[in-house]
Image (tube, coloured by chain):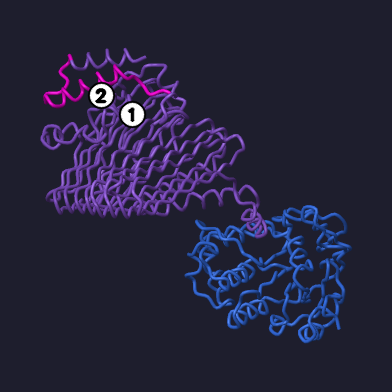
Chain colours: A blue, B purple
Amino acid sequence: MLQVNNLHAQAGEKKILNGITLTVNRGEVHAVMGPNGSGKSTLAQVLAGHPAYEVTEGTVTYDGQDLLDMEPEERARAGVFLAFQYPVEIPGVTNAYFLRAALNEVRKARGEEELDPIDFMDLAEERLKLVDWGPEILGRMVNAGFSGGEKKRNEILQMAILEPRLAILDETDSGLDIDALRVVAAGVNQLRRPDNATVVVTHYQRLLNYIVPDVVHVLAAGRIVKSGGKELALELEAKGYDWLTGGPRAA
Amino acid sequence: MTTSYLTDFDAIARNGGSKAPWLTGLRRSAIDRFAAQGFPGAREEDWRFNNLGPITSRSFPLAPVVAAAPTTRDVARFLYSIPGGSALVFLNGRFSPELSTPAPNVDGVTVSNLAAALGTHGKVLGDHLGRYAKIEKSGFTALNTAFGHDGVFVHVKAGAAMAGPVHAVFVSDGSTAGAAAYPRNFILLESGATGAVIESYVALQGGTYLVNTVTEAVVGEGARLEHTKIQRESEQAYHVGTTHVHQERDSHSTSFSISLGAAICRNNLDVVLNGPGIEGQLLGLYMGRGRQEVDNHTSILHASPNCSTREVYKGILDGTAHAIFNGKVYVTPEAQKTDAKQTNRNLLLSDRAKVDTKPQLEIFADDVKCTHGATVGNLDPLAAFYLKSRGIGPLLGRKILTYAFAAEILEELPYPAVRSGLEALVNARLEEGVEA
């Protein structure tokens, strides 16, 4: 589904990704781990088309298409979803309006009919259960005044409504208490299907207790330095990153 | 071009003019004042950013009676359905009882047109008219005082409350190029009274006309006023307006100002806090596109202690539009414990649009909390990316984010009908895009 090959990217003059290669297949969950500054969030944002980053080398193929040649909104309509590490507040626009506008753009791209507000509400109320929320959240302004945990939960709600084929969760666990973490992880797990894939970007192993990965990649200095099964995450939890990255406390 | 106004004035005076000597005197001193000072010019600080040439370089004779009077259906799109509300419709400045909906009878409340009130409430008007919006303020105020003969009149006696807002709808028919109308409004809320007035300035069709309007509002001790001005003139027209709110102790007032229309619009809003414990809110939204020029000059005089004011004006400029915001806050030495917050935020949708924003704080008391902030910027690229990442492309994203910028003001508008009506107008503007 997703082939990343020798991906290099930079922000301004600063090189951040220095040759990432990885393949994600349908039905798989990949975890991308690494210390701060290793480039894992940049990878997530580059895949979504964040304008702050420039790809200088390499290719990304998504479902046979050149992902890097697509505008961010085209990627989203093709089923790529980024759950933001820092979701953006949009006061003045209700969650309901935002979600319906987004869903209808995606549905149009899929050749499906747009949903009117009534049909949308039916769908939204059903998906709200996945994140253990009531309908009142739909009347609130997008992320405005939300707590950190609410913002992350709202990202998963958007994901539940848009039903992406490739979901990239960028540090979705940061700033979550254990109850919120469980809710968010349960939502993600219920959205897993044999024909979609999930990339979980995280610093800590904690989230992976709930969203169990098939493959774990460790990033350092913009490269994948090790890949393995889910047990690699546990090893990182026990030993830290330095033994892989050559940091000061390398074993 | 001042002489034509003087000639017009003499013609009206000869044809009867006013019966009340105080009014004849007020109008005479106003036209004399105008003859002496003329129109303001760019050398005056308060007008230095304005392009008044199109208004001052030609004369605007009094607008004629509307030839083909519009029907109720023609003006229905300008009206709001509000419980307890009433509507006074003026065509080219003249009251149209046929198109108006009278206010429900409430003890202590008078809502009528000003020309009628000169007969029924001559004493009240004689005591107040022209006392707040002074003819010395500018040539425009002087001209309005000289020529203004009708508008909305509200008098709410002590402790009484209006059943709902009165909506004064000033309709220009637009068919007579270069015609002028001078709406003159007066609001008196006695102590503990409650009142609400909406002024709309609209056009039946495009046209190059001038509306020069003045509103004086007196908010008595502990009274509450909600004043809303909606300027949606023809985009070829000129609009110059002054609203003067005079507040007594412990009173509340909220002033909304929405400006969408006119080639050149100048709104003056002067608020005087003449007693302790007063609260005031000044909320504004202006939109400019094409070559529109929209100017909001607000002035708040904190003349007493323990008063608080909150001012938020937001502007959305597209095309080669030009916006001016000047927010004056004057705090006298007596006005300790003043709490004044002022914000002016501008969103530029085009790199050819322009904003001159100027907070002007003059503070002569030491124990006060006065803040101000002005911003001029573009749409937040991070927010635009957030929308794109959800499948919402740049065009729809721009509309959503621009609407969101305006929503902070629109959400605070009173009455669901006014709110949704203006939301629809703003959305239509965003649909239509850059050029008028």
User: What is the tally of numbered marks visible in this picture?
Assistant: 2
Using the rendered image, report if marks 2 and 1 lie on a common chain.
yes
Give the residue pinned by disc 1.
B212
- Residue drawn 19% across the image and 39% down it: B112
Residue A208's place in the image compared with B201, above or below, is below
Chain letter for mark 1: B
In three-dimensional space, the C-alpha distance between marks 2 and 1, rounded to whole angstroms, equals: 10 Å
Of the image marks 2 and 1, the number of the one nearer the N terminus: 2
**Where does residue B144 sit, x and y in percent of width and height?**
28, 27
**Where does residue B122 sit, x and y in percent of width and height?**
11, 33
Of A173 and A15, the residue lying toward us = A15
Location of the N terminus of chain B (image quadrant): top left
Task: Name the quadrant containing residue B38.
Answer: top left
**Where does residue A153 sit, x and y in percent of width and height?**
59, 72
What amino acid is at disc 1? Answer: Asn
- Residue drawn 53% across the image and 68% down it: A146
- Residue drawn 28% across the image and 27% down it: B136
Q: Are marks 2 and 1 in contact (CB under 8 Å)?
A: yes
Task: Name the quadrant containing residue B170.
Answer: top left
- Residue drawn 32% across the image and 18% down it: B61
Q: Quick check: B270 left or right of A81?
A: left
Q: Let me know if residue A142 is in the magenta part.
A: no
Residue A237's place in the image compared with A138, above or below, is below
Q: Secondary structure at mark 1?
A: strand
Query: Which segment did they paint magenta?
Result: B14-41
Chain letter for mark 2: B
Residue B147, disc:
2
Q: Secondary structure at mark 2?
A: helix
**Where does residue B393 sit, x and y in percent of width and height?**
65, 52
What amino acid is at disc 2? Answer: Phe
Task: Name the quadrant containing residue A239.
Answer: bottom right
Could you classify mark 1 by the number of other residues whose Cα lies within 10 Å: few (under 14), some (14-19), or many (20 or more)?
many
